[in-house]
Amino acid sequence: MRRDGDLVWVTLERPEVMNCLSFPTLRRFRTLLEELASDLSVRCVLITGRGEKAFCAGADLKERRTMPTERVPEFVRNIRSLMDDVEALPQPTIAVVGGFAFGGGTELLLACDLRVAAPHAQIGLTETSLAIIPGAGGTQRLPRLVGKSRAKDLILTGRRITAAEAEAMGLVNRLAPEGQLEATALELAEAIAANGPVAVRAAKAAIDKGCECPLEEGLSFEADCYEKVLPTEDRLEALAAFAEKRKPRFQGR
């Protein structure tokens, strides 16, 4: 984990195995997420993988081959819980995809709020080619993002798509120019971090909850979130900065 002002980078550090997810990696990752969830001085979290070859190629199949069958459900529960932890972070999350993202790697980027990819990145829910299905949220999060028909195309064929194709279908938010992945991701993260952090967290919560419930309930939750930001010091600072023709200095209060 690397702190950069209001931003935090979380990097998968297993480039020799394309940043695959092993039991120890899952445990460490979940511990970091627990720490981040309680540190509201962090305004945005960027998740990436070490090296230019892979973001994350999913579960560690070498570990899986030696794993007793009775332990597999425990592993799947842990990887599923990791994705839930990522999605539940109060701060916005950005997947910074610098290479292959297959299986659980694609499920990880789906759990993030936004996705930035390098031109050479490839993405795919490849589990059906291994005679299993996406088990860490892929069958649920992908259709919510790109639609049921596109999700079935990708999951049932297990095919890999380019970053450009992923951007065209709305799976990737930003396609970085060659050699500009980190700069592109930072530009997006800094644009988020420049806004009122209490409001950003409230907006994320309103969107996430609202998309999972009837419109009337979503509108009611949005109203509750709006009322919570009204008494904040940041809201008053924004009004003062506008009147004084300067940039606001938000404190997260």
Image (cartoon, rainbow, N blue to C red):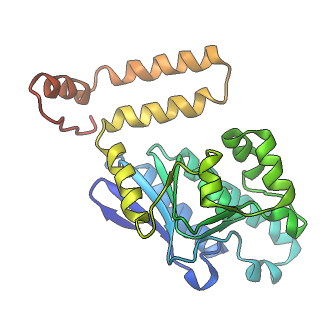
Where residue 29 appears, as percent x and y from the top left, is 54, 65
* Left or right, residue 133 beside residue 9: right
Percent x, y of residue 5: 26, 57
Residue at image coords 42%, 37%: 201
Q: At which x and y percent is residue 218?
A: 59, 20
The C terminus lies in quadrant: top left
Image quarter where the N terminus lies is bottom left
Give the answer, above or below, for where 223 lies relative to 98.
above
129 on left or right of 108:
right
Rendered image quadrant of residue 233: top left
In the image shown, does 67 or 98 lie closer to the viewer?
A: 98
Residue 168 horizontal side relative to residue 204, left or right = right
Q: Residue 198, can we see it?
A: yes
Closest to the observer, 233 or 186: 186
Q: Residue furthest left?
A: 244
Location of residue 158 by image quarter:
bottom right
Q: Is residue 41 above or below residue 217?
A: below
Q: Residue at x 86, y 55 (%)?
A: 156
88 to 206, vertically: above or below: below
Tell me if I can see residue 82 in this picture: no
**Residue located 44% across and 58% down the image:** 46
Which residue is more in the foreground, 13 or 103?
103
Residue ID at (66%, 30%)? 212
**Number of marks drawn:** 0
